[in-house]
Image: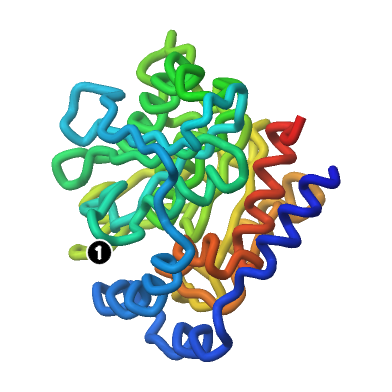
Amino acid sequence: MTEQTQQTEQAQQTRQLPPDVIAQLKALDPAVSPELAQATWALLTPFHEKAGYTAPKIDRDLRYGDDPRHRLDVHTAGNGQAGAPVFVFVHGGGFVRGDKHVPGTPQYDLVGAWAVRHGWVGVTMTYRLAPEHTWPSGAQDVAAAVRWLRAHIAGYGGDPDKIVVAGNSAGAMHVASFAAGQGAAGPADPVGPGGIAGAALLSGIYEIGAPRPGEPEHAYYGPNPGPEVSPLPGLLRTTVPLLFSVAERDPGLFQEAAARLVGKWLDRHGTVPDLVWVEGHNHMSTIGSLTVDEAALGVPLARFVERVTGWPR
C-alpha cells in the first residue's frame, strides 16, 4: 500500500455518520419499499449536501446506444487528468424503475463525486427497463456501455483498460449477468467480461428461482426462468476479479443469497469470496454511505478498485 493510499484511507475513515443516524437507519423496516427509500434518503441527504455530491465537471446524457435509456454521465475533476481508473455505477430499481440522476438529490451523482475524490473518472448509467425489456437486456446494456467507454473514455481522462463496473440491487444483478458472460451481442462480440478490470456486486441475488407474480423479478425474468438466467455458475468460472457486499439490514433474501454464494464459492475455489458486510446500513443506504460513512463500504470498495487497476501508479 502506497503512502498516498494510506493518507486517502485515513482521511476517508474520518467521514462517519453520527451514531444516532446509524441507529435510525437500523430501526427502519428492512423490507425494500418506497417508504424505506424515502426515510433513508431523508436521513442521508443533509450529510451529502454538506460534503458536496457533485463532481467539478459532469458531461450528461452521453449516448451509448439507440434506446432512449442508453445514456450515461461522465464525472471528472476537469483538470486534464489522463489514464485514471474508471468507476461505473449501475443503479437499482427492481428492474422496472430508477435513474442515474435525480435532479436536486444526491442520487446518484454522489457516486461520480466519490470516484472523482479518489482521483478516478466516475460514470453513472441508465439501462432499459422491464417489462418492455427482459433478460438479458440489462447485461447487454452494461456490455454496450463498456463498449462505448472503451472507445471514448480516454477523451475524458480515463484508461479503457482500468474499467471497474459496480451495481446495486437490480443493478448488481445486471452487472453479475454481464460478468458471467450473458451480455454478448453475438458470438463475435469482442466486448465481454474480459473488457473490464473488475466488478463489484452490491446487495445482489445470483441464483434466480421462479418469482411470484407481482415480484420485481417476475417482470424481468418471466414466470418460469430456466437455470440459464442465473449468473452464479458464470461468476464461479470467471477470471474477472469480483467484490460482493451485503448490508447488515438487507432483507433475508439478500442475506441468504450471500450465504449461498459463500458456500458455492468455497466448494469451487477452496476459499471464500471477497465479501463486504456493510455495517449499520440497509438496502438503500449501502450506496448512500459512500463519502458520508466511508468505513462501511467506501474504504474496502476503493481498496478493491485500486488493487485491480494498479492505482495509484
Q: Name the residue beneath numbered marker 1.
A: 215
Q: Is residue 172 left or right of residue 136?
A: right
Identity of the residue drawn at 81% across and 50% down: 270
The mark tally for this picture is 1
Quadrant the C terminus occupies: top right
Other-residue count near label 1 (Cα within 10 Å), few / some / many at <14 / 14–19 / ≥20:
few
**Above or below, comparing residue 163 to residue 111 in the picture:** above
Q: Nearer the viewer, residue 155 or 285?
A: 155
- Secondary structure beneath dot 1 equals loop
Q: Is residue 3 left or right of residue 313?
A: right
Amino acid beneath label 1: Glu
Residue that lies at the very extreme toward the top in this rendered image: 188
Quadrant the N terminus occupies: top right
- In percent of width and height, residue 169 lies at 41, 57
Identity of the residue drawn at 67% across and 38% down: 241
**Above or below, comparing residue 48 to residue 3 in the picture:** below
Quadrant for residue 297, please give it: bottom right
Q: Is residue 186 left or right of residue 60?
A: right
Q: Nearer the viewer, residue 254 or 19?
A: 19
